Amino acid sequence: MSSVTYSESIILIASIIVASLFAGIVLSSMGMIESAYTSISQSERTTLTTKIKVIFADQLDSTTVYVYVKNIGKTVITSVDKVDIYFGKYGSAQYIPYNSSSYPTWNYTLLNNNIWGPNDTIRITVYSSTTLDEGIYVVKVVTPNGVEDEYVFSI
């Protein structure tokens, strides 16, 4: 009879250990899921509060265009050098690399501060590899988190 009680005690202790291990694994997984959800929520919040508006674009000379972009969101846009610029004749715009050693390329000037904060405007200077002929042009600006705006203008 005592051997049955002894066996039942061992099985009970083993069951408690297995249940504790299972609970630990489940709680650990829940913590990782919560952490991932928090990270995704923060990223989505940043995207939702980021807004830009291309307010004006005009030709400076035969190969250069100024583009004025205003941050109309509630988030400071960091890493302006990571912004993607697409520029060209309407229907055939191409990606323009930032601060390249060869043309086409673009750079920027912060007009109000040292950061691109809410209500601040930057001037993007696009340098074309060819002379800009008369026609309809488009410039598209895409922030590092995917928020975009475009502007169509004629030269």
Image (spheres, grey):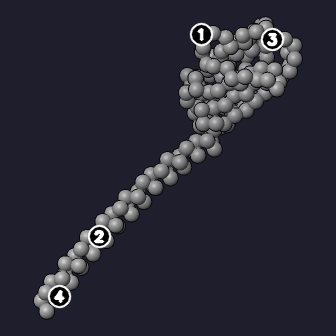
Q: How many marks?
A: 4
Residue sitting farthest toward the bottom: 1
Give how far apart the Cα atoms at labels 1 and 3 are.
20 Å
Per the image, the residue denoted by label 2 is 18
Within the image, what quadrant is residue 93 found in?
A: top right
Q: Please report whichever mark, 4 or 1, sits nearer to the chain's N-terminal start.
A: 4
The disc labelled 4 sits on which kind of residue?
A: Val
Which circle marks residue 140 in the picture? none
Mark toward the start of the polypeptide (2 vs 4): 4
| Coordinates of residue 101 in the picture (x, y in percent) | 59, 10
Give the structural element (helix, strand or loop) at label 2: helix
Question: What secondary structure is marked by label 3?
Answer: loop
> Which residue has dot 1 on it?
101
Q: CA distance from mark 3 to mark 4?
A: 93 Å
Q: Earlier in the sequence, mark 3 or mark 4?
A: 4
Instruction: Identify the element where label 4 is drawn.
Output: helix
CA distance separating discs 4 and 1 = 83 Å
CA separation, marks 2 and 4? Answer: 21 Å
